[in-house]
Each structure stands twice: as structure tokens, then as C-alpha cells.
Amino acid sequence: MSGFRIRNKSHKMAVKVIIALSLVLCGLLLGFGTGMPLHASCKLHWTFGTKCVEINTKLIDQMKKWKGPENCKQGGEKCLYEVLSSNSSFIKATHTTPVKQYVDTQTYSFKQSGELCIVEAFSSSNTWYAVLDYGTNYCNLHNLVEGAKLDKLDHYTETTSDSQCTQYTTANCTVY
């Protein structure tokens, strides 16, 4: 087919739009078929055996510790976190991937239940067409808990699944 050529800019743009929409449609169909979220994201449920104010403070401290690019030099993505807003029951933050500079928005909601702190955490890609993420959104959240050593606390649990967290079971948090 050496004679196939798109002759003007509007036709070239139309072809690009069709290709992009086809990729998005394939991603949506893949999500329906696998039970994964339809957009690259992750929802986690954590339980900690301590006061929520302590968990909140330690997560913010860890984000500040990993704010700059220094920690990226060793590989992985334990860097480029930014706290956008916070109060005693809520944190909004972002994580930027060091290579491609993709931004994921995160939210953390805290609820004290007796001696337990219940945290609902969510990370979602800001890139509208992102469907698969190699578990990046999961690792955005999980790495902070490990970095702050909150996974060592009494009564710590983490609950999620592939239906709530893109590529959760194949996530490699030493890379992402």
C-alpha cells in the first residue's frame, strides 16, 4: 500500500482522534472484562491500632520527606509527593512519576473508631486516558505506609482488590 497517504491536516487530525478513541475504547473493554477500575486508580482501606492524628501526621511527614527528586536517584518512585491540603480528618496530595512526570491525585480520609484508626485512601491518575498503570496508584499509597513504618503498628491491615485497584496483584512497589 505504498500509495496510501493522508493529504491534509484535518484528515491527519481525524485519524489521530480515531486512533486515540479506539485505544480508550479498548481500555474500557479491558476494564469491563477483568473487573478492574475503568481508569488507572486505587482505593485502599487501612486499619491502624492508634489515634488517627498520629497516622495523619506520619503520612504528611513521609510525603514531605519524599517531596523532592533525591530519593528517585536510587530507582523507584518514592519521591515527588506534594501535600496540597490537610486537616485532622483529611489529606489531599499528589505524586508525580519521576520519568514521565505523570501526576496522580491522592486523598486520605481518617475516622477514629475506638482504639482503631480507619483510613480510606484513594489515588487516581490525572491523565484522562490512563487505564493501566502497572500498579502505580497502589504503590503511591502503599509506599507511604511502609516508608513511615505504619505497617509495623499493632492491628495494621490493608484491604483492596483488583476490582478497586488497577493491577494490584501484579504491582511491584520496588519499581513503582
Image (tube, rainbow, N blue to C red):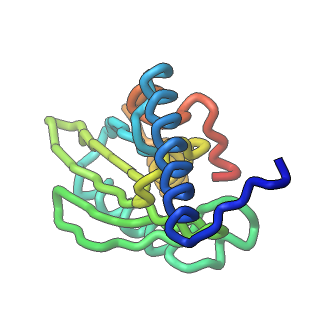
Q: Quadrant of residue 47?
A: top left
Residue 137 visible in the picture: no
Which of the two residues, 41 or 9, is positioned nearer the viewer here? Answer: 9
Residue 136 image offset from top left, x and y in percent: 55, 49
Q: Quadrant of residue 71?
A: bottom right
Which of the two residues, 35 or 61, is positioned nearer the viewer here? Answer: 35
Looking at the image, residue 15 sits to the left or right of residue 175; the answer is: left
- Number of numbered tags placed on the structure image: 0
Residue 123 image offset from top left, x and y in percent: 39, 51
Residue 26 image offset from top left, x and y in percent: 52, 34
Decide: is 90 above or below 61.
Answer: above
Question: Of all residues shown, which one is farthest toward the front?
Answer: 3
Which of the two residues, 142 or 61, is positioned nearer the viewer here? Answer: 142
Looking at the image, residue 114 sits to the left or right of residue 6; the answer is: left
Residue at position x 63%, y 32% in the image: 170
Residue at position x 58%, y 28% in the image: 169
Residue 13 visible in the picture: yes
Residue at position x 17%, y 44% in the image: 111
Question: Of all residues shown, which one is farthest toward the right?
Answer: 2
Residue at position x 56%, y 46% in the image: 133
Decide: is 127 above or below 134.
Answer: below
Residue 19 image offset from top left, x and y in percent: 56, 49
